[in-house]
Image: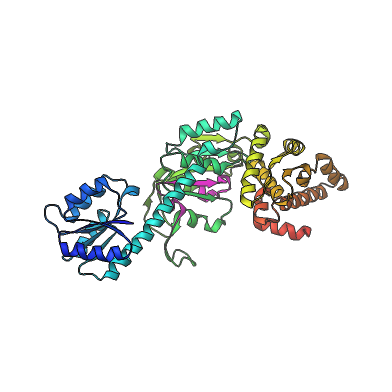
Amino acid sequence: MRILIIDDEESMRHMLSLILKKEGYDVVCADNAKQALNVLAKQEFGFILCDIKMPEMDGLEFLKSLLAPCPLPLSPVVIMMSAYGTIDTAIECMKLGAYDYISKPFKSDEIILTLKKAEERERLRRENLRLKHSIAREYNFENIITKSKEMLDVFNLIKKVCDYDTTVLITGESGTGKELVARAIHYSGARKDKPFIAVNCGAIPHALIESELFGHIKGAFTDAIKTKAGLFEEADKGTLFLDEIGELPADMQVKLLRVLQEGEVRKVGDTKSIKIDVRVISATTKNLLEEIKKGSFREDLFYRLNVVEIHLPSLRERQDDIPILADYFLKRHCMKFSKNISMIDKDAMDLLLSYKWQGNVRELENVIERAVILEDTDVITPNSLPFLKQTPDTRHQTLDKAMLSIKKAEESIEKELIKKALDMTSGNKTHAAKLLEISHRALLYKIKEYGL
């Protein structure tokens, strides 16, 4: 790691050089701030140790010259030093972008510890930036696998709306990739470096949803032992994705409408509102216009959320995508599980193409993942997909056995669907509940009821 020392005292430069070289640092010295700026124009440094009180240009002026025009990810970490400093001076240094402030005289251990802490912070910051860039690449809409006209039209809409703050409503069946599209909008737009927060409105208990979305202050209710920020506040400057917006209770619909209109939230139990800057993207599997007719969804909220609608077609409506999606999931899960499966044979692909994908892309991925785990050869065949062999004829046999009792037929079909979902997810009840579009608690109850 290369360090630049800036100090007008030769003894200080010499002492610091000895300490830091002993620790393995590559050290360069400058006896004034202007010389340091010239050195920085020619070489890159990870850290700078800079004195504050210097002739011509002091440390604070140096900080302003160094950090003001330089983007944060490229800036070196600056640690200021002074024998004449005060708390106000330290605060001013921090405001100008310095990482830390050390009072002279200091012990050698103190400067080494400060540098080690700064190194760790830099490592975490760079890792965070790397992960953000990786996520942005992963969720770029161009990485969504498709060749269908319907999905290409979706891409065109994403391009048009991603840089604007307008609300977007994503509609489509469960498993079509609504959250994936929401992330693609966020990570393709101007807010990509800010938070993306996703919440399923149907998964939060009614009593807790206001606190989850808007936060609460200490003492607002029995379990409020400390003040907590809500999801809107956590998503400030970024995007909040409200999945299954059609499940939002009526009283919360009114409060959400106010947030969208006013651009501010009020914590539960608080008397003051907080300004927020959040882009809202919502999604639903329900027909909200039908819900409005039933009186279970507010019309004014619908029009606030539905400035731009993006409808995702079901996998049944874009069958041409099944082979390329299946191949993509095969490669992905072979890498994940270190399996060497080269292809899906024609008969297996025909089976995939003939199947009615009620769970859409999510169900297809689950099927391929399970096949990869269980397959011992290097080819996926129909034998690798036994759970897809339950043809319509098999299902009719189930109904025949139930005779003419609608209740028994419903129970029989429900039991078979639960067994199939558990089989597809290798017994993972959380994933199975998502495929079945019921709550985890309801699934546990039905498993017990049917003795599965």
Residue 88 showing in the rendered view: no
Residue 113 showing in the rendered view: yes
Quadrant of image for the C terminus: bottom right
Q: What span is colored magenta in the figure?
A: 229-253
What residue lies at 59% left-to-right and 28% top-to-bottom? 149
* Place of residue 36 in the rendered image (x, y in percent of width and height, measured from the top left): 20, 51
Q: How is the image coloured?
A: rainbow
What residue lies at 78% left-to-right and 60% top-to-bottom? 451
Is 142 placed above or below 208 here?
Answer: above
* Place of residue 291 in the rendered image (x, y in percent of width and height, measured from the top left): 60, 41
Residue 270 horizontal side relative to residue 410, left or right: left
Is 341 placed above or below 229 here?
Answer: above
Residue 70 horizontal side relative to residue 398, left or right: left
Q: Nearer the viewer, residue 361 or 337?
A: 337
**240 drawn magenta:** yes
* Place of residue 26 in the rendered image (x, y in percent of width and height, measured from the top left): 30, 57
Outermost residue to the top: 149
What residue lies at 70% left-to-right and 59% top-to-bottom? 444
